[in-house]
Amino acid sequence: MNRPYVIIVSEVTLDGKLTLYRGASSKELMSIMTKEVYKYLHSIRAQVDGIMVGCETVRTDDPSLTVRYVEGKNPVRIIPCSTANVPYHANIFSKDAKTIIVTTERAPKERVEKIKELGAEVIYAGEELVDFNKLLPMLYERGIKKLMVEGGASINWEFVRLGFVDELRIIHLPVVIGGENVPTLVGGEGFKSLKKLMQFQIVNHFVIDNFLITEWKTIKT
Ligand SMILES: NC(=O)c1ccc[n+]([C@@H]2O[C@H](COP(=O)([O-])OP(=O)(O)OC[C@H]3O[C@@H](n4cnc5c(N)ncnc54)[C@H](OP(=O)(O)O)[C@@H]3O)[C@@H](O)[C@H]2O)c1
């Protein structure tokens, strides 16, 4: 399959959590990151053609997904959203970058029209949920050769489940939150079998202001 090279990038606590509690915006947790750590994150954004977060992350975090802490071009923002249920005032509709909302036939036409009026492109891939088997070749055709996936847990699982991950870069937040129901790096069903696990080789690690950064490549089996 012709698909973009996929890098999952995430800020994760020492106990693997993505946010303070289920339903909380991760912006609060990320506020502990220093400017230098943000520069690392934004330098990756500046090197990719596209950046993706799940629709739930748009609804809870309202991220801008632009390059701000370093010089560089904004990647195309890509949001899988099966019923096009995105708040119309969301920051992803700012004019700073192109935005693609990926939806399904379940999306009400009025929402699709409104999103187009806001200047975003709408593409269809899948019936129930967005189908990444269909979407990734479409993105590749549109010039998205390198894609950064910034979560959340459900979207990360889709990429892991389908084996569409080439790299994983983790900013380890030096805190522990606890809580059984707090989303972790990867959600979904889980593999439940040692034979099926996605495996990684560490390629780089360094520390920025007490934040360990680890960079991993997928071991293709
Ligand atoms: N620390 C970090 O680096 C980081 C980064 C990002 C997010 N977060 C946190 O993660 C949490 C959100 O994660 P989340 O797992 O709830 O949501 P998510 O992964 O951001 O988005 C999931 C949503 O995407 C849509 N979707 C469309 N096609 C899909 C598919 N094939 N598979 C799965 N989802 C599909 C669905 O919404 P529709 O039903 O509307 O289609 C689904 O509910 C928030 O608390 C956020 O703060 C943390």
Image (cartoon, rainbow, N blue to C red):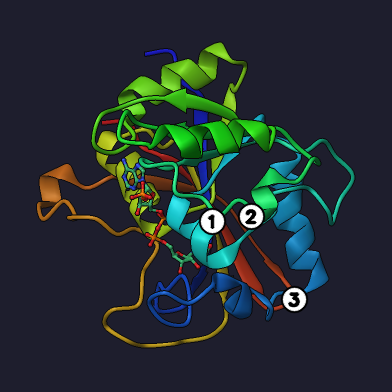
Q: Nearer the viewer, residue 90 or 38?
A: 90
Q: Nearer the viewer, residue 170 or 145?
A: 145
- Rounded to the nearest angstrom, the CA distance separating label 1 from label 3 is 28 Å
Direction from residue 70 to residue 217 in the image, left or right: left
**In percent of the image, x 36 and y 13: which residue is there?**
1
Residue 50 pos. (x, y %): 62, 33
Residue 134 pos. (x, y %): 34, 21
Crowding around mark 3 (Cα neighbors within 10 Å: few <14, some 14 to 19, many 20+) is few
Residue 36 pos. (x, y %): 80, 66
Image quadrant in which you'd find residue 213: bottom right
**In percent of the image, x 74 and y 56: which residue is there?**
40
Q: Which mark is residue 90?
A: 2
- In the rendered structure, which disc, 1 or 2, sits on the residue that comes first in sequence? 1
Closer to the eye: label 1 or 2: 2
**Secondary structure of residue under mark 2:** loop
Image quadrant in which you'd find residue 82: top left
Crowding around mark 1 (Cα neighbors within 10 Å: few <14, some 14 to 19, many 20+) is many
Direction from residue 105 to residue 141 in the image, left or right: right
Residue 150 visible in this rendered orientation of the protein: yes
Q: Nearer the viewer, residue 200 or 90?
A: 90
The quarter in which the C terminus is drawn is: top left
Q: Which residue is mark 3?
A: 209
Residue 12 pos. (x, y %): 50, 69
Q: Which mark is residue 58?
A: 1
Amino acid found under the numbered disc labelled 3? Asp
**In percent of the image, x 57 and y 81: which residue is there?**
174
Q: Confirm if mark 1 falls within 8 A of ligand 1.
A: yes
- In the rendered structure, which disc, 3 or 2, sits on the residue that comes first in sequence? 2
Query: Which residue in the rendered view is the most extreme toward the front?
Result: 110
- Rounded to the nearest angstrom, the CA distance separating label 1 from label 2 is 7 Å
Amino acid found under the numbered disc labelled 1? Val
